[in-house]
Amino acid sequence: MRQLIGGALRTQAVYVVAKLGVADQLSLGPRSADDLAEALHVHASTLRRVLRFLVTCGVFLEAEDGRFALAPPGESLQTGHPRSLRPSAIRAGEGMWNVTSRLLDAVQTGRTPHDDVHGTTFFERMSDSDKSRAFAARMNGSTTGLGTEIARLDSIRNARTVVDVGGGHGGLLIELLRAQPSLRGILFDRAAIIEGARSTIEAAGLLDRCELVVGDFFQSVPKGGDVYLLSWILHDWSDDQALRILRACREAASNDARLLIVEVLLPARAAVLKETNDGVIVDPYTLDLQMLLLTGGRERTAAEYAGLLGEVGYDVCETSTPVSARGASLLEAQLQEC
C-alpha cells in the first residue's frame, strides 16, 4: 500500500530523468552524478538523490565508486531505444499530471477531466498540426508488427480494398499493403492527420495503391471496402459515440464486407495483473482510466463489443487474442444475416 501511495513520486522522478535525458547520457557507460550534472546543467547533489531513489525502483544501478549505470528497465528511457518509453514518461510528468489529479472530480461528476483542464476536447486539441503529427507517430508505434498478424486473415487475403477508418498516418495500412501486394487501401481520417499522412505513404512507395480521404467518421466513411478496419478507435469514445462510428461503417459497407476491430479487451472480472510468458504485463485497467481521463472513452470486454456490434446488425465471428505487444485483441465481425 505504501508503494501505491508513493506512486506520484515515482512518476515525477522518472519524468525528471526522462526530461533531462539521463539515460542517453548513460548509454555509453557509467558516470558519476557530478559528471552527469555538469553535462546536463543541473544541481549535482539533488540529481544524485533522485538517481539513488530510482536505483531502489530498479531504473538505475549504483556501483561501489558511486557511479550510476542503466538497469535493464532504465534502458527504455533512451531516445534511440526501439521501444523507447521516454516520450511516455515525459507525457506522464507533464500533460497527464494535472489531468490525473482530477480523477476524484471525474468520479463525482462523470465529466472528462481533460476537457476541464484544457478547455477543449482531447481530439480538438490534437487538431493542431504539431500535436497531430506527434499523436499520429505514437499511434503508428502502437500498431507496429500488427499488420503481419492481420494480413494472415482470410478476409484480408481475399480482399481487394481495405478502408482504414481513423488510420492516422497509415502505419498499419502500410504493413497490410506490403504484406498483400494485390491489396488496395483507403486511409480515412481528419484533414490535419491526412495532410501529414501523405508524406508517410509516399515514402513507403504506396501512393499508387492507397487513396487518402478526409472526413468525419461520425458522419460517414468511404464506400467500396471489402474490409473496414478500426484500430484503437472505439475505445476513445463513449458507447453512444462508438455506435455512431459503427453505424457509419455499416451504411458504407456491402453486405459481405467484414469489420476488423483492434482493441485491448477487459477481462470479465478484474484480478491482480500477472506477467505473460515473455515478461510483459498487459494492463487494460490503466488504459481504461486513461481513456476516462483524456477522451471520455473506455476499454470494454469482448461481450460489450459484441453488444455494440449487435446493435448495428453485426455478429463477432472470430476473436484473436492477443495480437500485439500491447495486448490488443482482434475481433472480426460480419452481418448477422450473412
Image (spheres, helix red, strand yellow):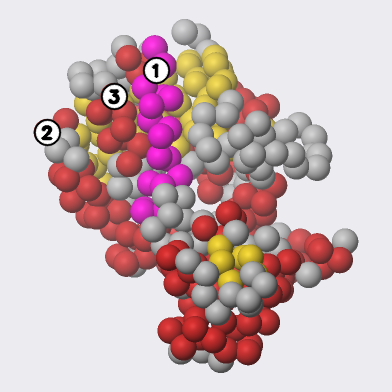
Q: Quadrant of residue 278?
A: top right
Residue carrying label 3? 179
Q: Which residue is mark 2?
A: 208
User: Which disc is residue 180 wearing?
Assistant: none
Q: Could you tell which of marks 1 and 2 lies nearer the N-terminus?
A: 1
Does residue 13 show up?
Answer: no
Residue 303: % across, % down = 68, 27
User: In the rendered structure, which disc, 3 or 2, sits on the residue that comes first in sequence?
Assistant: 3
Extreme residue toward the right, this view: 1
User: Residue 263 vs residue 192: left or right?
Assistant: right
Q: Kindly identify which residue carries mark 1.
A: 152
Say what amino acid the circle numbered 3 marks: Ala
Task: Sort mark 2 into few (<14), some (14-19) or many (20+) by Cα contacts within 10 Å.
Answer: few
Q: Secondary structure at mark 3?
A: helix
Who's the residue at 64% across and 39% down the image? 279
Q: Nearer the viewer, residue 109 or 141?
A: 141
Kindly report the distance in space between the C-alpha atoms of the residues bearing marks 1 and 2: 23 Å
User: How much space separates mark 3 and mark 1, taking CA atoms?
Assistant: 9 Å
Q: Residue at x 47, y 8 (%)?
A: 338
Residue 165's spot in the image, x, y percent?
37, 38
Q: Nearer the viewer, mark 1 or mark 2?
A: 1
Question: Residue at the location (39% across, 58% down)?
Answer: 80
* Type of amino acid under label 1: Arg
Corner quadrant of residue 33: bottom right
Magenta part of the chain: 136-154
As shown in the figure, which amino acid type bears the numbered disc 2? Asp
Residue 56 in the magenta stretch? The answer is no
Work out whether 137 lies above or below 306. Answer: below
Q: Secondary structure at mark 2?
A: helix
> Residue, x 53% and y 25% (percent of image)?
331
